[in-house]
């Protein structure tokens, strides 16, 4: 130990400064690491008991939406899967309001026509994007909130984008980033409005991932396709 003390006394100042900085960083990081490990190792919470037996997932056919839907089904929730192919969003909203929806995942979104100047795309393309990325999020959320308020519990997860929060601007994707900016601010405000009523609200800021986000719609109207799934009863 004496030799170590002698070595430290002879060490240059820059070395001692870096060593102290490293020790402070480790001391600050260690509590967060312990919390993270605790969350990873503990038994998953029963979402059915905390939020309810039904979950609504929009855009569930690929990418993040598909993964979320599969995980919720694995954890025993009944699912309402809303895609962008058929039926009418208003009718779907009516059905959703009649269910004990405890979790809503607003994942559906489109990025088509992709990277273009604003004037280069047909106006209807921007209208379609607004219908899906903005209007649908608002209407489906409004459909589930009354039931969540009556039961005093619920969770709303909105899929945003790093293009609206992580960077100052997103040229050639102006409308897409603008709609996702709405989702972020919409989520923040909902969180403040409903946190005291037992409803959790999150906005996930995603970066690039594998999906068919840019595939667009096949019609001039925003439509929704609804599938009700009741998984077999199983432990969580």
Image (cartoon, rainbow, N blue to C red):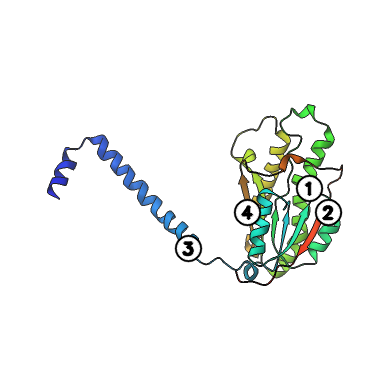
SS for callout 3: helix
Q: Which residue is mark 4?
A: 202
In the image, which is nearer the foreground, mark 3 or mark 4? Answer: 3
SS for callout 2: helix
Q: Which residue is mark 2?
A: 89
Q: Can residue 156 be seen in this snapshot?
A: no
State the mark number for residue 41.
3
Tag 2 and tag 1, C-beta contact below 8 Å: no
Instruction: Name, please, the residue furthest toward the left.
Output: 2
SS for callout 4: strand
Question: Which comes sooner in the sequence, label 2 or label 4?
Answer: 2
Image position, residue 126 (x, y; %):
79, 37
State the mark number for residue 135.
1
In the image, which is nearer the foreground, mark 1 or mark 3? Answer: 3
Q: Quadrant of the C terminus?
A: bottom right
Quarter of the rendering containing residue 143: bottom right
Question: Which comes sooner in the sequence, label 4 or label 1?
Answer: 1
């Amino acid at each position: 130990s004496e030799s170590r003390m002698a070595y430290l006394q002879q060490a240059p100042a820059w070395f001692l400064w870096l060593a102290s900085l490293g020790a402070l960083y480790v001391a600050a990081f260690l509590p967060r690491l312990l919390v993270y490990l605790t969350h990873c190792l503990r038994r998953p919470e029963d979402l059915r008991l905390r939020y309810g037996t039904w979950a609504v997932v929009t855009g569930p056919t690929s990418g993040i939406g598909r993964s979320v839907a599969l995980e919720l089904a694995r954890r025993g929730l009944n699912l309402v899967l809303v895609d962008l192919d058929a039926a009418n969003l208003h009718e779907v909203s009516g059905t959703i309001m009649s269910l004990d929806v405890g979790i809503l995942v607003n994942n559906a979104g489109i990025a088509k026509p992709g990277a273009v100047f604003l004037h280069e795309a047909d106006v209807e393309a921007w209208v379609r994007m607004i219908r899906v990325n903005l209007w649908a999020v608002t209407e489906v959320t409004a459909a589930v909130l009354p039931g969540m308020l009556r039961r005093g519990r619920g969770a709303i997860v909105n899929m945003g984008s790093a293009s609206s929060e992580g960077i100052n601007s997103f040229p050639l994707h102006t409308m897409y980033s603008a709609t996702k900016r709405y989702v972020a601010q919409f989520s923040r405000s909902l969180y403040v409005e409903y946190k005291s009523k037992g409803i959790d609200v999150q906005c996930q800021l995603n970066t690039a991932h594998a999906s068919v986000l840019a595939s667009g719609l096949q019609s001039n109207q925003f439509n929704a396709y609804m599938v009700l799934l009741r998984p077999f009863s199983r432990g969580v």
